[in-house]
């Protein structure tokens, strides 16, 4: 995982690609080492934020099947999903994704407790829901039962009664835009100002497209699923295109059962 090639089998090969194959699954510690954020990030708001995205796509570019990502995922993908959450200060998701995927509060996991404590992090990442309309059900556990208060990120023009409802449920409201619009670059800055520099977005496609267009995405962890779905499912990023495509480089590559677990980073970071 620490070199580009050869392709590394997630369940049978040691983290050192030059070492002998071993018949065991990678430990969460090994995965966490491989997917660690840059070491200069700090939890006091003084560090530079790092925005990582985690998405899955079929061979023909579908980010979902029947409206959800679960059908094109696998157990190893979910293991990496959990590792990325275990490393993050905050998980950022669009309101539509929160509704479709049935988001619940992030939970504390013993496997990451010592690592998080050493990094100055709380027991679990916060969840930040990005919404211009504030069309959310604030009676859900995501808002009423989180280990860490859920953040609702919206624009300055959000309806006052919806802001009041969010706060009454226990959520923290973050203003990151003017009127009813949320500014993706400001989302990153506002969260970093709260000490949430290790940022992870799980989409959906519209939110990821906004981060891409704003030029604030530092890293993409993309699982390529060995499936074909056809149809008209969304890509991993939607919305307006960028004038000049931004180049990313391949930082690592894993394989299991035909699934490819790729990690790309911006060339200037």
Image (cartoon, grey):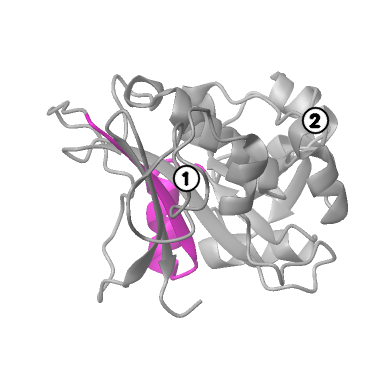
Residue 114 magenta: no
Q: Is residue 237 left or right of residue 252?
A: left
- Can residue 266 be seen here? The reply is yes
Mark nearer the N terminus (1 vs 2): 1
Q: Secondary structure at mark 1?
A: strand
The one of 52 and 30 positioned closer to us in this rendering: 30
Query: Which mark, residue 21?
Result: none
Q: Secondary structure at mark 2?
A: helix
Residue 210 magenta: yes
Q: Which residue is mark 1?
A: 54
Badge 2, how many Cα within 10 Å: few under 14, some, many 20+? Answer: few
The one of 21 and 196 positioned closer to us in this rendering: 21
The one of 188 and 116 positioned closer to us in this rendering: 116
* Residue, far left: 230
In x, y percent, where is residue 240? 28, 59
Q: Please state the extent of the stretch shown in magenta in the rendering.
A: 202-226
Q: Which residue is mark 2?
A: 110
The one of 165 and 208 positioned closer to us in this rendering: 208
Asked whether the beta carbons under mark 1 and mark 2 sit within 8 Å of each other, the answer is: no
Query: Label 1, label 2: how many angstroms apart (C-alpha)?
Result: 22 Å
In x, y percent, where is residue 131? 56, 43
| Above or below, 43 relative to 128 | below
**Residue positioned 58% across, 50% down in the render:** 200
In x, y percent, where is residue 258? 27, 32
- Can residue 155 be seen here? The reply is no
Q: Is residue 21 left or right of residue 255?
A: right
Q: Nearer the viewer, mark 1 or mark 2?
A: 2
| Above or below, 163 relative to 198 | above
Q: Is residue 2 left or right of residue 236?
A: right
């Amino acid at each position: 995982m620490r070199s580009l090639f050869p392709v590394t089998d997630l369940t049978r090969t040691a983290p050192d690609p030059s070492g002998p194959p071993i018949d065991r699954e990678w430990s969460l510690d090994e995965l966490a080492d491989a997917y660690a954020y840059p070491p200069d990030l700090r939890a006091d708001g003084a560090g530079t934020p790092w925005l990582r995205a985690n998405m899955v796509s079929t061979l023909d570019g579908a980010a979902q099947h029947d409206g959800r990502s679960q059908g094109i995922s696998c157990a190893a993908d979910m293991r990496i999903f959990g590792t990325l959450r275990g490393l993050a200060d905050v998980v950022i998701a669009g309101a539509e994704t929160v509704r479709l995927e049935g988001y619940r509060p992030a939970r504390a996991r013993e496997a990451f407790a010592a690592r998080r404590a050493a990094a100055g992090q709380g027991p679990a990442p916060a969840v930040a829901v990005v919404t211009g309309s504030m069309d959310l059900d604030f009676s859900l556990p995501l808002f009423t039962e989180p280990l860490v208060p859920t953040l609702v990120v919206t624009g300055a023009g959000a309806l006052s009664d919806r802001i009041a409802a969010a706060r009454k449920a226990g959520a923290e409201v973050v203003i990151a835009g003017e009127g009813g619009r949320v500014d993706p670059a400001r989302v990153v800055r506002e969260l970093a100002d709260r000490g949430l520099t290790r940022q992870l977005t799980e989409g959906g496609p519209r939110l990821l497209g906004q981060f891409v267009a704003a030029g604030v995405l530092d890293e993409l962890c993309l699982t390529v699923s060995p499936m074909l779905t056809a149809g008209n499912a969304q890509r991993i990023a939607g919305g307006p295109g960028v004038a000049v495509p931004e180049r990313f480089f391949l930082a690592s590559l894993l394989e299991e059962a035909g699934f490819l677990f790729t990690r790309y980073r911006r060339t200037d970071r």
